[in-house]
Amino acid sequence: MGVLKKFEQRLEGLVNGTFAKVFKSEVQPVEIAGALQRECDNNATIWNRDRTVVPNDFIVELSAPDHERLSPYSGQLGDELAGMVRDYAKQQRYTFMGPIKVNLEKADDLDTGLYRVRSRTLASSSSQPEAPQAPAGPAAGRPGPSAPGYPPATPPGAPPMPSAPPPGTRPGGYGYPQPAGQRPPAAPASGGRTRYWIEINGSRHQISRPTLVLGRSTEADVRIDDPGVSRRHCEIRTGTPSTIQDLGSTNGIVVDGQHTTRATLRDGSRIVVGSTTVIYRQAEG
């Protein structure tokens, strides 16, 4: 079961439906969870072959109406989101420099249903990377975002990790980055033909035709066995640029953290359909 699906099920079962009102808001918690996953992926800093450090301090900016609806649950929702980040990091073999925290803030410049995620890496007093740790068993409680329940990833006898990225590497989550729309685009690779593919739960599906239909039906080009996915849910069109179009699905699509019916795709774009995350990829050569 995927990390986002488990996160959604935990929310649904909490406090006899305490989160029922949350799920009626314009911004869905599972959308925020997907955006936090993407924030980790986009700001991952490779220290060496065995260690990739990701941000551990997140701020989710919400519109005034969404913040008003979600703020009564912000503490528990923040804990659950932090737990989801921990689970995702374990799955991706990411490590942290300190405890995971997720806070909700109001942003007056955002319209209802829109949000932004900012992140940074805050080192703990030991400045050692912290690896996510799985619970001891099904009955074990989840540590809160400030709990120290992650063992250092540095093996005994290894030199301590620095508290800042090595010179010449990507800055990752060190300091809150600008919104995605203000970040400089990555330089395209040169030469060769562009290849397109998608990744679903670790499986790669090549896109060999101009269009690719995703859905629950056996007639879809890529079948997704998810009750939240419509028979013909959405269609990816490759090109310059590539795009995705909702095909009148019941639950819609979320692209890079935004509910939409049509969006431009770039390498690494994260598409959420139902409870399934699809990563769009393209490369030259």
Image (tube, rainbow, N blue to C red):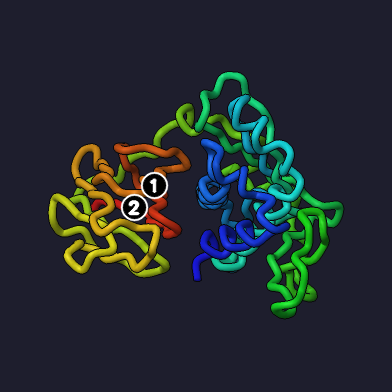
Q: Could you give the CA–CA distance between mark 1 and mark 2, rounded to whole angstroms?
A: 5 Å
Residue 248 visible in the displayed image: yes
Tell me residue 12's x, y (percent).
Answer: 61, 58
Q: Nearer the viewer, residue 38 or 228?
A: 228
Residue 178: mark in rendering: none
Badge 2 density bin: few <14, some 14–19, many ≥20, Cα 10 Å: many
Snapshot quadrant of residue 219 = bottom left
Q: Are marks 1 and 2 in contact (CB under 8 Å)?
A: yes
Taking the view exactly as shown, the residue that stands out farthest to the left is 209
Residue at the (60%, 42%) spot, across then down: 171
Q: Identify which residue, 201 or 11, lies in the foreground.
A: 11
Q: Position of residue 154 (x, y in %)?
A: 73, 69
Could you tell whether 195 is left or right of 250 in the image?
left
Q: Quadrant of the C terminus?
A: bottom left
Q: Residue at 81%, 54% (x, y): give it.
A: 146
| Residue denoted by label 1 | 269
Q: Looking at this view, is 109 or 158 the one in front?
A: 109
For the residue carrying disc 1, how many other residues have a C-alpha within 10 Å: few (<14), some (14-19), or many (20+)? some
Which residue is nearer to you in this view: 221 or 168? 221
Q: Position of 22 compared to 230: left or right?
A: right
* Residue 95 showing in the rendered view: no
The residue at 74%/78% (across/down) is: 136
Give coordinates of residue 270: x percent, y percent. Answer: 41, 49
- In the picture of the structure, the residue carrying the numbered disc 2 is 280
Q: Is residue 74 above or below residue 135?
A: above
Which of pointers 1 and 2 lies earlier in the amino acid sequence? 1
Disc 1 marks which amino acid? Answer: Ser
Q: Residue at x 26, y 57 (%)?
A: 214
Q: Please name the amino acid that badge 2 sits on.
A: Tyr
Label 2 sits on a secondary structure element that is: strand
Mark 1 element type: loop
Quarter occupied by residue 8: bottom right
